[in-house]
Amino acid sequence: MIGKVFLVGAGPGAPDLLTLRAAEILQRADVVLHDALVDSRTLALAARARRIPVGKRSGRVSTAQKFINKRLVDAARTHRVVVRLKGGDPMLFGRAQEEIDALRSAGIDVEIVPGVTAASAAASEIGVSLTRRGLARHVALVTPRAADGERGNDWAASVLAADTAVIYMGARLAEMISAELMKRGKSPRTPVAIVESASLPGRRVFLGKLADLPRLAAQTGDGPAVVLVGEVLKEAARERGAVSASSVEPLLRQA
């Protein structure tokens, strides 16, 4: 028997942001290989499935990608509905192409089910559009991280060229990000934000300027976080007068 593999986006965290298509597939799943940060309530939808954690967390021991690829292929040879459940959207910084290529090489059918990505969730938490007529028409989604053995990427060039940038997996690299962007001409006064655990009850927002970024990042916890950079954040920072979670969280709870 050759089954089918679904690469499903679990969204930024909140289970009610899952798409209807994703929920329906999870309910039919025989096997679910899931990321570390997928909410337990989302996993509960796969009530009849065997659930296998294969998560990756920055700076921690993680499941090797080749091993995940093999588990997917093996699962599809013994089960009809196999789900690879990824945080956010599978096609953004989810190493989806490696899994797609491995499955296609093994003759296994693959379907992609998109999810809400962290950039959209973070912008929604702040109440700021990533694009804005007359101010921001270019958005860059980047990550400065590279796996061991991979060549580096000029992420900073993309940030400098864009009106708004969202930096995935950037909070722990805040000092390097701030220094590199300012060295290459970005104003230290450029508005920035860090959004941690977007869409979840423990979400936190930190607003400030590019020069403040390392200090803001030092206040974050263990939740997934993205860094936003751009003039679209200026009014939000001014209105809230916020550079710390203590002044922002009450506003989010009232929203």
Image (cartoon, rainbow, N blue to C red):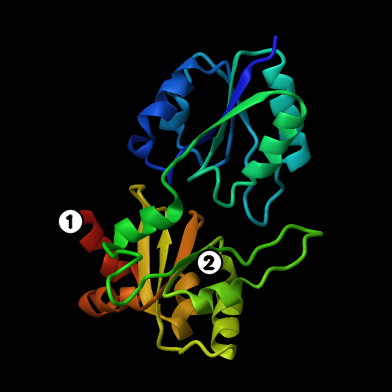
Query: Which residue corresponds to the image point at 38% horizontal and 33% vertical from the top-left?
Result: 19
> Count of labels shown?
2
Q: Quadrant of the C terminus?
A: bottom left
**Residue nearer the viewer, 3 or 237:** 3
Q: Which mark is residue 106?
A: none
At which x and y percent is residue 24?
Answer: 41, 21
At which x and y percent is residue 3?
Answer: 64, 16
Q: Residue at the right extreme?
A: 149
| Element type where label 2 sits in the image | helix
| Element type where label 1 sits in the image | helix
Query: Mark 2: which amino acid?
Result: Ala
> Which mark is first along the chain, 2 or 1?
2
Local packing at callout 1 (Cα closer than 10 Å; few below 14, some 14-19, many 20+) is few
Local packing at callout 2 (Cα closer than 10 Å; few below 14, some 14-19, many 20+) is many
Q: Where is 190 relative to 223, above or below? A: below
Q: Residue at the left extreme?
A: 254
| Rendering quarter of residue 17 | top left
Q: Where is 60 relative to 19, above or below? A: below
Query: Mark 1: which amino acid?
Result: Gln
Which residue carries the number 2 mark? 171
Left or right of residue 82, residue 242 in this image: left
| Rendering quarter of residue 39 | top left
At which x and y percent is residue 207?
Answer: 35, 73
Between the residue at mark 1 and the residue at mark 2, the CA separation in whole angstroms equals 26 Å
Q: Are marks 1 and 2 in contact (CB under 8 Å)?
A: no
Q: Is residue 159 visible?
A: yes
Q: Residue at the top extreme?
A: 1
| Rendering quarter of residue 116 | top left
**Residue nearer the viewer, 104 or 1:** 104
Which residue carries the number 1 mark? 254
